[in-house]
Amino acid sequence: MLAAMTTAEAGHAPVGSAEERFMATGECRATSAHRSHSMSRARERRFDCEPHRAGIPNDCPGRRFASKETTCKRCCVKFDPMNLLPRSARALTPLKDAFATRFRQFVSAPRFPCVGAKSAMNRNRVAFGLYEQMADPGDAAQLCDALADFSRQYPAPGADPVSFVAMFRQPVANEDDFHDRLWTHLQVMHDLDATRHAWDDTVSADVDDPTFSFSIASRAFFVVGLHPQASRLARRAPFPCLVFNFHDQFEALRSNGRYAKLQEAIRARDIALQGDINPVLASFGDASEARQYSGRARAEASAHPFRARRAS
């Protein structure tokens, strides 16, 4: 449930120890500042509230539930499954199904050209995540964790398409704004991921290399950006999205001979929709796939600030 219950509403009996009190009521008696920090939703989301700049008080019983990645998720809230998420995620959870429904309607439109996406949707092989805005560090951290879980669910996805769709509530101004936000978001994700995982060694980490592919949790992904301001009709989703597809799945499609047929069908449908295909499209190994991520069709589409770092 989203609203925190009082101790009486929850049916808890009086408790004595600090940890028992925390488990029952979510209250931390350590400091008044620490207890009140959760009142500021925007500040909590950015992990910059005053108590956490100084660290969690040692005598806060919520400390045992904290993790390195999500310090602010825990201390002064009800110990409830919903409260294990950052407050922004708690608020977005009830909205995710509505956003996912709109995305499904977008893909299921008769003229939508990507038959691979249609196949994944029809087979229920699409996972969704809803986030507040692109380029936000907190949202980037959540997406890293979601993709790591998604990757563990599909260690060998086979040739049937499967995708993770990251949806964002906040709009983008135009195609250039989306392009910049996409690459900023991927950079923030990589900077976080590089502290725990090496780059997938089956692909290049050099964004200008023809064999480049984005890597999270040591797994390569092909990223497709979609948003309402896209010049390409096939990318004009109702809200900003980043669609993550396993790179090794494309290799599986190539090995069984399905990739060329799938690519031909998609391009034919794209021409029927818009009259031509996106000029930045290329096959893996011919040019860096990074040019395709945002969907921007201008000649400088490959311009981006992304730099891979060594895992630490």
Image (cartoon, helix red, strand yellow):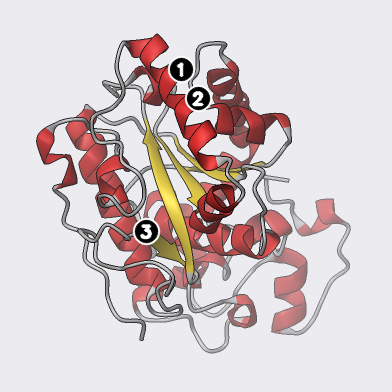
Towards the viewer: 70 or 311? 311
Towards the viewer: 57 or 13? 57
Give the amino acid type for the residue marked by disc 2 in the picture.
Ala
Could you say where residue 259 lies in the image, as x and y percent from the top left? 52, 41
Q: Residue 131: tell me if it is visible.
A: yes
Could you say where residue 68 lies in the image, as x and y percent from the top left? 49, 79
Q: Secondary structure at mark 2?
A: helix
Disc 3: which residue? 213
The crowding category of the residue bearing disc 1, from other C-alpha atoms within 10 Å (few below 14, some 14 to 19, many at least 20), is some
In the rendered view, would you say 273 is above or below 18?
above
Cβ atoms under marks 1 and 2 closer than 8 Å = yes
Residue at 60% over, 61% down? 151
Give the amino acid type for the residue marked by disc 3 in the picture.
Ser
Give the CA separation, mark 1 to mark 2. 6 Å
Disc 1: which residue? 269
Cβ atoms under marks 3 and 2 closer than 8 Å = no
Residue at 69% over, 60% down? 153
Q: Which disc, if any, is residue 265?
A: 2
The crowding category of the residue bearing disc 3, from other C-alpha atoms within 10 Å (few below 14, some 14 to 19, many at least 20), is many
Could you say where residue 154 lies in the image, as x and y percent from the top left? 67, 59
The crowding category of the residue bearing disc 2, from other C-alpha atoms within 10 Å (few below 14, some 14 to 19, many at least 20), is some
Residue depth check, mark 3 versus mark 2: number of the one nearer the observer: 2
Residue at 63% over, 82% down? 64
221 left or right of 173? right
Give the CA separation, mark 3 to mark 2. 23 Å
230 left or right of 148? left
Give the CA separation, mark 1 to mark 3. 25 Å
User: Which residue, as the protein is rendered here, is positioned at the far front?
Assistant: 257
Quadrant of the image containing the C terminus: bottom left
16 left or right of 226? right
Could you say where residue 177 lies in the image, as x and y percent from the top left? 20, 36
Towards the viewer: 203 or 53? 203
